[in-house]
Amino acid sequence: MNTDTEKQFTIEYRFNASRRRVWEAWTDPSVAMLWWHPHDVVIKEDSLYIDLREGGSYGYTMVIPDGTEYPTVGAYTKIAEPELLQFTWGADTASATAEAVDEEPPLITVELSERDDGTCDMRFHVQGIADDRGSEHGMYDGWVEAFEELTTAFERVDR
């Protein structure tokens, strides 16, 4: 595991949804399809898959407005339903450069806590990438936008 303390960040986010719903958003491909991307980006149809088990994998391809595709894959390392998901995250190694393949992929830990009011607190921790908030196409801001996409998806369903 990558232990470089400079290359990590945490995002804390509260969803106006139950922990069960947020868990399903992370683990159900039909829901993940709605939000595993920043604003103005989409997931390529039929590219998203989830094999939800320790050692299982997931993958998807983001498509930005100019049509450029960004395949992403990872593997689940810990699962404790409905409160913890841990997984690697990175570029599809089949399309990555040799030096990127040699690097250890970032590790993401998602912790979900049910609140008494029926909302859910999420702690999203990335080990292996520095806090790059404010940078163009940064991972930090991209994930914040993805969580905003999930919030919007919950609001559409609840109407």
Image (cartoon, rainbow, N blue to C red):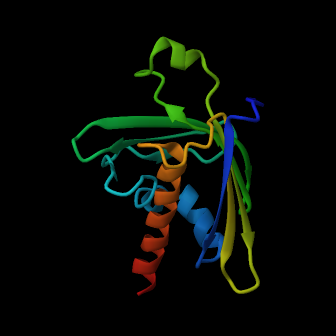
| Residue at 68% in and 40% down | 8
Question: Residue 61 falls in which quadrant of the image?
Answer: top left
Residue at left offset 62%, top offset 36%: 129
Say if residue 126 shows up in the picture: no
Q: Quadrant of the N terminus?
A: top right
The image quarter in which residue 128 lies? top right
Give x and y (percent) for residue 97: 45, 16
Residue 117: image location, x then y, percent? 71, 86
Q: Is residue 3 left or right of residue 52?
A: right
Residue lying at 46% horizontally and 62% vertically, measured from the top left: 31
The residue drawn where x is 33% and y is 51% is 41
Task: Kindly give the residue lying farthest to the top in the view shown.
Answer: 98
Q: Position of residue 122 (x, y in %)?
A: 67, 64
Q: Is residue 137 left or right of residue 20?
A: left
Q: Which one is nearer the viewer's eye here, 117 or 9? A: 9
**Viewer-closest of 88 and 39:** 39
Residue 96: image x %, image y %?
44, 21
Can residue 132 be seen at all in this image of the molecule?
A: yes
Q: Quadrant of residue 24?
A: bottom right
Q: Nearer the viewer, residue 75 or 112?
A: 112
Residue that protrudes farthest toward the left in the picture: 66
| Quadrant position of the C terminus in the picture | bottom left
Count up the numbered dots.
0
Q: Is residue 81 above or below residue 71?
A: below
